[in-house]
Image (tube, rainbow, N blue to C red):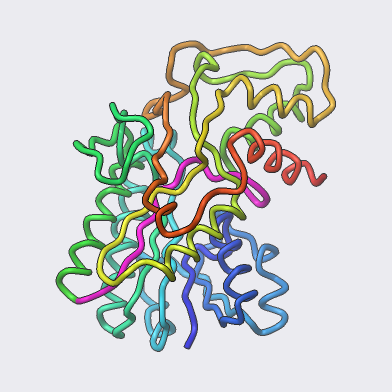
Amino acid sequence: MFSVVTGGAGFIGSHIVDALVQKGEDVLVIDNMKTGSVGNIQQHLREGRARLIQADLTMDGWQDACEGASRIYHVAADPDVRESAILPEAQISNNVLATARVLDTMRRFDIPSIVFTSTSTVYGEARVIPTPEDYSPMEPISVYGATKLAAEALISAYCHSFGLTACVFRFANIIGERATHGVCWDFIEKLRKNPHALEILGDGRQIKSYLEVHACVEAILFAAEKSGKGYNVFNIGSEDWIDVRSIADIVVEEMGLDGVEYRFTGGERGWVGDVPRMLLSIEKIRSLGWRPSVGSGESVRMAVKALLGK
């Protein structure tokens, strides 16, 4: 028996592969390598604990390799909220159609369990903060959030129609080593190009929950083993939040810079589809016995250090 990790050469996916291999599992990674890196899983490939198939989930050619798997961790997605307002068709294909293909492969080969990485953006601009899993109405304000909610609906339907078991995880902002996008990565890249000034999208007062990636993966594996059969949904995040200006301060400090001018683009949103305030209720996963070991500020500092190679 083995596990499949789609998007397993990418940011969160490769950390899941690390954790599964550490548990003694063999892993099949399926990744189109558009944002993934072989380097993220090279050691496991070399040691024979992981196999890699480079494939597009919306196409054929990868499905037969999944036969005999015990679980699919479906992490592969197009995660760029800003880009989804420019090229929505790509995200609909990569996030919705790809999920449908994964689910049909599970039905075809009797793979019993799926773990799906979703997002807090499915809630839209929630009026209840911290936001619980049973919040309604679910009204995403980005195409990205809509595609993830659509994928959740497909997973629910397959669980009820074909007896699958699912753990769906709605993430806060997950940050850390190997990230290739997001506010910490973006600020570092901007300051490397110009250490004297930093463009900050919006007014800098956007305030959200952040969680370091290792803590996130710990929560995923914990809940996947502790939850029951059928369709399960869990929020994963820290228990506090931090504003964008404070994140900029941490990045500037860790890069050893002085006198950086902050230039705000203005408005409460940094981009189309940006949710200015987000904090998830994690009472459900806490009731199983898991609690984050780090908060938002510490997660940001750990992520920045990792991205800087400290």
Image-based side of 238 in relation to 185, left or right: left
Q: Is residue 208 above or below residue 262?
A: below
How far across and down, in percent of the image, does residue 46 sit?
Answer: 72, 80
Q: Is residue 193 above or below residue 304?
A: above
Look at 39% across and 28% down and name the residue there.
275
Count all numbered tags in the image, as a single digit: 0
Image-based side of 104 in relation to 215, left or right: left
Residue 171 included in the magenta stretch of the image: yes
Q: Residue furthest left?
A: 161
**Does any portion of residue 118 appear in the rendered image?**
no
288 or 185: which is nearer to us? Answer: 288
The magenta segment is 163-180
How far across and down, in percent of the image, does residue 125 sit?
Answer: 31, 28
Look at 82% across and 22% down and name the residue there.
257
Image-based side of 51 in relation to 267, left or right: right
How far across and down, in percent of the image, does residue 59 sit?
Answer: 36, 69
Q: Is residue 8 above or below residue 303?
A: below
Q: Is residue 215 above or below residue 223?
A: above
Quadrant of the rendered image containing residue 217:
bottom right
How far across and down, in percent of the image, does residue 211 sit?
Answer: 56, 43
Look at 47% across and 58% down and name the residue there.
289
**Does any portion of residue 140 appear in the rendered image?**
yes
